[in-house]
Amino acid sequence: MPNHAGYAAAITIRQRVFDDAFLSAWHSNNISHSVDASIGQFPRRIGSVSLFIAPPHAQFVSFNRVDGTLRLNGWGTITIRLNAFPSSPEKADVQWQADILITPTPKLFGPI
Protein backbone atom coordinates (compact mmCIF):
# COMPACT_ATOMS: atom_id res chain seq x y z
CA MET A 1 0.00 0.00 0.00
CA PRO A 2 1.43 3.41 -0.92
CA ASN A 3 2.41 5.84 1.82
CA HIS A 4 0.06 8.53 0.55
CA ALA A 5 -3.06 6.36 1.21
CA GLY A 6 -4.62 7.37 -2.08
CA TYR A 7 -4.93 11.08 -1.28
CA ALA A 8 -3.77 13.82 -3.62
CA ALA A 9 -1.95 16.89 -2.45
CA ALA A 10 -2.04 20.42 -3.80
CA ILE A 11 0.71 22.93 -3.22
CA THR A 12 0.34 26.65 -3.78
CA ILE A 13 3.49 28.70 -4.11
CA ARG A 14 2.95 32.42 -4.18
CA GLN A 15 4.66 34.81 -6.57
CA ARG A 16 6.29 36.50 -3.59
CA VAL A 17 8.25 33.30 -2.81
CA PHE A 18 9.83 33.37 -6.28
CA ASP A 19 10.52 37.11 -6.10
CA ASP A 20 12.22 36.74 -2.71
CA ALA A 21 14.33 33.82 -3.98
CA PHE A 22 15.40 35.75 -7.11
CA LEU A 23 16.19 38.85 -5.06
CA SER A 24 18.25 36.81 -2.59
CA ALA A 25 20.19 35.15 -5.43
CA TRP A 26 20.76 38.54 -7.08
CA HIS A 27 22.06 40.13 -3.84
CA SER A 28 24.39 37.17 -3.19
CA ASN A 29 25.79 37.44 -6.77
CA ASN A 30 24.41 34.04 -7.84
CA ILE A 31 22.71 36.00 -10.64
CA SER A 32 25.04 38.26 -12.59
CA HIS A 33 24.49 42.01 -12.37
CA SER A 34 25.94 42.84 -15.78
CA VAL A 35 26.73 41.63 -19.28
CA ASP A 36 29.76 42.93 -21.18
CA ALA A 37 30.50 41.62 -24.65
CA SER A 38 32.38 42.62 -27.79
CA ILE A 39 31.30 41.95 -31.35
CA GLY A 40 34.07 41.07 -33.79
CA GLN A 41 37.76 40.35 -33.33
CA PHE A 42 40.47 42.92 -32.63
CA PRO A 43 41.46 45.05 -34.57
CA ARG A 44 38.19 44.76 -36.53
CA ARG A 45 35.92 45.05 -33.49
CA ILE A 46 32.62 46.43 -34.77
CA GLY A 47 30.70 46.83 -31.54
CA SER A 48 30.23 46.21 -27.86
CA VAL A 49 27.43 45.81 -25.35
CA SER A 50 27.55 46.78 -21.69
CA LEU A 51 24.29 46.09 -19.84
CA PHE A 52 23.27 46.23 -16.19
CA ILE A 53 20.72 43.64 -15.00
CA ALA A 54 18.20 44.73 -12.37
CA PRO A 55 16.84 42.14 -9.88
CA PRO A 56 14.66 39.55 -11.70
CA HIS A 57 10.92 39.50 -11.13
CA ALA A 58 8.52 36.53 -11.35
CA GLN A 59 5.10 37.24 -12.80
CA PHE A 60 2.13 34.87 -12.87
CA VAL A 61 -1.18 35.67 -14.52
CA SER A 62 -4.64 34.64 -13.36
CA PHE A 63 -5.75 33.16 -16.71
CA ASN A 64 -2.81 30.72 -16.89
CA ARG A 65 -2.08 28.96 -13.62
CA VAL A 66 0.74 26.80 -14.96
CA ASP A 67 3.20 29.05 -16.77
CA GLY A 68 4.83 32.15 -15.45
CA THR A 69 7.17 34.81 -16.74
CA LEU A 70 10.63 35.65 -15.48
CA ARG A 71 11.13 39.32 -16.29
CA LEU A 72 14.63 40.68 -16.64
CA ASN A 73 15.27 44.34 -17.32
CA GLY A 74 17.96 46.92 -17.05
CA TRP A 75 19.92 49.57 -18.88
CA GLY A 76 23.30 50.11 -20.46
CA THR A 77 25.12 51.13 -23.63
CA ILE A 78 25.52 49.68 -27.09
CA THR A 79 28.44 50.82 -29.25
CA ILE A 80 28.70 50.17 -32.99
CA ARG A 81 31.49 51.14 -35.41
CA LEU A 82 30.05 51.23 -38.92
CA ASN A 83 33.23 52.37 -40.70
CA ALA A 84 36.87 51.38 -40.34
CA PHE A 85 39.28 53.31 -38.13
CA PRO A 86 39.83 56.21 -37.44
CA SER A 87 36.13 57.13 -37.44
CA SER A 88 34.53 57.27 -34.01
CA PRO A 89 31.92 54.66 -33.04
CA GLU A 90 28.21 55.36 -32.56
CA LYS A 91 27.10 54.95 -28.95
CA ALA A 92 23.53 54.65 -27.62
CA ASP A 93 22.11 54.43 -24.12
CA VAL A 94 19.40 51.75 -23.92
CA GLN A 95 16.78 50.43 -21.55
CA TRP A 96 15.86 46.79 -22.16
CA GLN A 97 13.43 44.12 -21.02
CA ALA A 98 13.38 40.36 -21.59
CA ASP A 99 10.40 38.18 -20.66
CA ILE A 100 11.23 34.47 -20.31
CA LEU A 101 8.38 31.95 -20.21
CA ILE A 102 8.83 29.46 -17.35
CA THR A 103 6.86 26.33 -16.53
CA PRO A 104 7.49 25.24 -12.92
CA THR A 105 7.93 21.48 -12.63
CA PRO A 106 7.69 19.92 -9.16
CA LYS A 107 10.11 17.19 -8.19
CA LEU A 108 10.15 15.14 -5.01
CA PHE A 109 13.41 14.14 -3.37
CA GLY A 110 13.68 11.26 -0.97
CA PRO A 111 11.38 8.36 -0.12
CA ILE A 112 7.62 8.70 -0.38
Image (tube, rainbow, N blue to C red):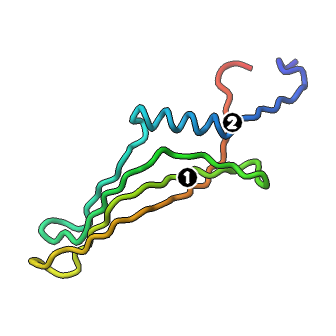
Q: Residue at left 39%, top 35%?
A: 29
First in sequence: mark 2 vs mark 1: 1
- The picture places residue 45, in percent across and down from the top left corner, at 19, 69
Q: Is residue 7 above or below residue 42?
A: above
Task: State the CA–CA distance, disc 2 to disc 1.
Answer: 21 Å
Q: Is residue 56 left or right of residue 59?
A: left
10 Å neighbourhood of mark 2: few (<14), some, or many (≥20)? few
Assign the C terminus to one quadrant of the image: top right
Q: Is residue 52 left or right of residue 72?
A: left
The circle drawn on residue 15 is none
Q: How many marks?
A: 2
Q: Which residue is mark 2?
A: 106
Q: Residue at left 77%, top 51%?
A: 62
Q: Identify the secondary structure beneath mark 2.
A: loop
Q: Which residue is mark 1?
A: 71
Assign the N terminus to one quadrant of the image: top right
Foreground residue, 99 or 16? 16
Q: Is residue 10 left or right of residue 36?
A: right
- The picture places residue 50, in percent across and down from the top left corner, at 31, 57
**Disc 2 marks which amino acid?**
Pro
**Disc 1 marks which amino acid?**
Arg
Q: Identify the secondary structure beneath mark 1.
A: strand
